[in-house]
Amino acid sequence: MACRNLLQTRRRLFVFLTQQRDLSSPSLSNFLQSYRPPPASSSQHAPSSFITPNSSSCKASTARVYTEVNLGRPQDYCDYENFELQWGNQDHYEVLRRLGRGRYSEVFEGMNIVNHQSCTIKILKPIKKRKLKREIKVLQTLFGGTNITQLLDIVRDPVSRTPSFIFEYVNNTDSKVLYPRLTDFEIRYYIFQLLKALDFSHSQGIMHRDVKPSNVMIDHEQRKLRLIDWGLAEFYYPNKEYNVRVASRYFKGPELLVGLQQYDYSLDMWSLGCMLAGMIFRMEPFFHGSDNTDQLLRIVQVLGSSELHDYLNKYQIELGEDVNPSIEGQRKKTWSEFQTPTNEHLFNPLVEDLLDGVLRYDHQERLTASEAMMHPYFHPVKKQENLPRPLPLEVGLQLSA
């Protein structure tokens, strides 16, 4: 009983200190009165294209898994065009500090002054209403999914009409700081957690289309991972042509770079593979192109020229005339060629095989998220997850009293 009272006292003290700390923090309403969104930053999403514009000649391609999952759903399941938004009360939130910014938003740590819970406030820059509705519909569809960021509320300033998303707060460590310090087991663990998020998303018929380190929040102390920023996510339908101007350059799949519009969930698996390679070989990003043309060249320098042409021929894809001639004559490298004294403790035959399974030109041959989770590389993680969990602190203290 004494231990429980002590914990309750600590919680009350935390709320009191939080209230005192935030006396000078502006409410979200007051903050937005003087808020001016920064100019749009240079983006890796849409550099110049070098592909043949007539994509109708490409061979049809459909996903190997969850192909028709959206076809059997009610019409309003994916209908974000006619989706009615329900706005919350922005006076319930105050802004504490800026966490970062992206092309479409600025992100702040915030506080819900009603329940004194920390939160993340994503203030959106002016965007099309269709895009806003799509992101909200996706987030609501994925609510409660494994390792998916939780959308708690959506609010809008009545004067500026600036919309903001309210998310759960994750005490993230920047990937540039965290990734170089990760152990072999920790890399396996976090990639496995990311696969859980992707498999859930794909099972709900949704492609993320922008998987990259800055969209994967990791609270390393709590071993908690959340996949965030679903602004480019889209519902998947077989035989539908999608915009190839998605994903950040270093994580774009070959299908985007050669203009194949009938892509699918496997795009996310390529991006995950780029993250894994960067973690293992301590090369962030692993494929470091200066533009789309150079990005394809960087991939070809690893996966080979003849293999690229096999892929292009299979899907009847023609490259534009301004493609870099250096993509010819490149041999396929082995993953062991990237092994160095600084990363050799992370490289092994299992991760080599996993990289082979996800970093493939042919998107239909890549491992799916569920297949990748079955890979032996993750056996140590699954073995630990199956161990009995320790009792919660309060229960443990009561039993030992």
Image (cartoon, rainbow, N blue to C red):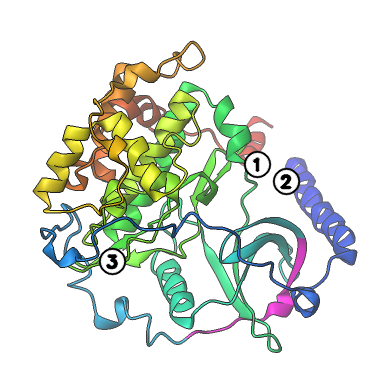
Q: How many marks?
A: 3
Say above or below: 127 vs 346: below
**Precedes in sequence: disc 2 or disc 3:** 2
Q: Which residue is mark 2?
A: 4
The image quadrant where one finds the N terminus is: top right
**Precedes in sequence: disc 2 or disc 1:** 2
Q: Which residues are magenta?
A: 85-96
Marks 2 and 1 in Cβ contact (< 8 Å): yes
Q: Residue at x 78, y 80 (%)?
A: 33
Where residue 394 is drawn, which disc sits there? 1
Q: Nearer the viewer, residue 393 or 265?
A: 265
Q: Amino acid at mark 3?
A: Tyr
- Could you classify mark 1 by the number of other residues whose Cα lies within 10 Å: few (under 14), some (14-19), or many (20 or more)? few
Q: Residue at x 65, y 63 (%)?
A: 106
**Precedes in sequence: disc 1 or disc 3:** 3
Residue 54 coordinates in the image, percent (x, y): 19, 66
Residue 165 coordinates in the image, percent (x, y): 59, 70
Say above or below: 350 vs 151: above
The image quadrant where one finds the C terminus is: top right
Which tag is nearer the camera, tag 2 or tag 3? 3
Secondary element at image label 2: helix
Residue 63 lies left or right of residue 246; in this view the side is left
Q: Nearer the viewer, residue 289 or 199?
A: 289
Residue 21 coordinates in the image, percent (x, y): 87, 58
Residue 322 coordinates in the image, percent (x, y): 31, 51
Q: Which residue is mark 3?
A: 242
Q: Amino acid at mark 2?
A: Arg
Q: Amino acid at mark 1?
A: Glu
